[in-house]
Amino acid sequence: MGLLLIAGYWLRGAAAATALLLAVFFGLMVRAYAKGMEINCGCFGTGDPISWKTLLRDGSMLAAALALTVLSFLGRRKPEPDGAAGA
């Protein structure tokens, strides 16, 4: 997915799939945090226990993925036929 996003190929699908995966992952993290579970997230190297910092970090990644998804759908409009824009 990441390579598709960087290369710009199949941008709509890759952005939507990435946002969906991050949303599921973030939802599970929030649930574990709310239940007080002692889970160490090793996504960024060291085993960080789930805290408000990890939720903020992952929530910001989810927000960026959602923004990219929305922008990918808004940026790909069909071109107008010649002369239709000034009519």
Image (cartoon, rainbow, N blue to C red):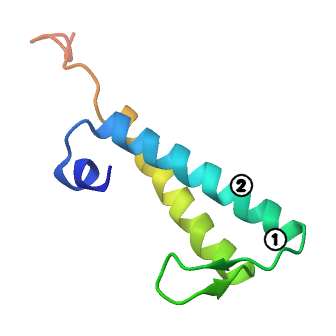
Q: Residues within 10 Å of mark 2 (few under 14, many from 20)?
A: some
Seen at 58% across and 68% down, the residue is 58
Front-lying residue, 71 or 41: 41
Residue at numbered disc 2:
27
Residue 55: x and y, percent?
68, 72
Residue 54: x and y, percent?
65, 78
Q: Is residue 14 left or right of residue 32?
A: left
Seen at 24% across and 19% down, the residue is 78
* Above or below for 13 versus 64: above
Residue 57: x and y, percent?
58, 75
Asked if labels 1 and 2 touch by Cβ distance under 8 angstroms, the answer is no
Q: Residues within 10 Å of mark 1 (few under 14, many from 20)?
A: some
Seen at 19% across and 10% down, the residue is 84
Name which quarter of the figure residue 35 lies in: bottom right
Dot label at residue 33: 1
* Above or below for 11 versus 26: above
Front-lying residue, 80 or 52: 52
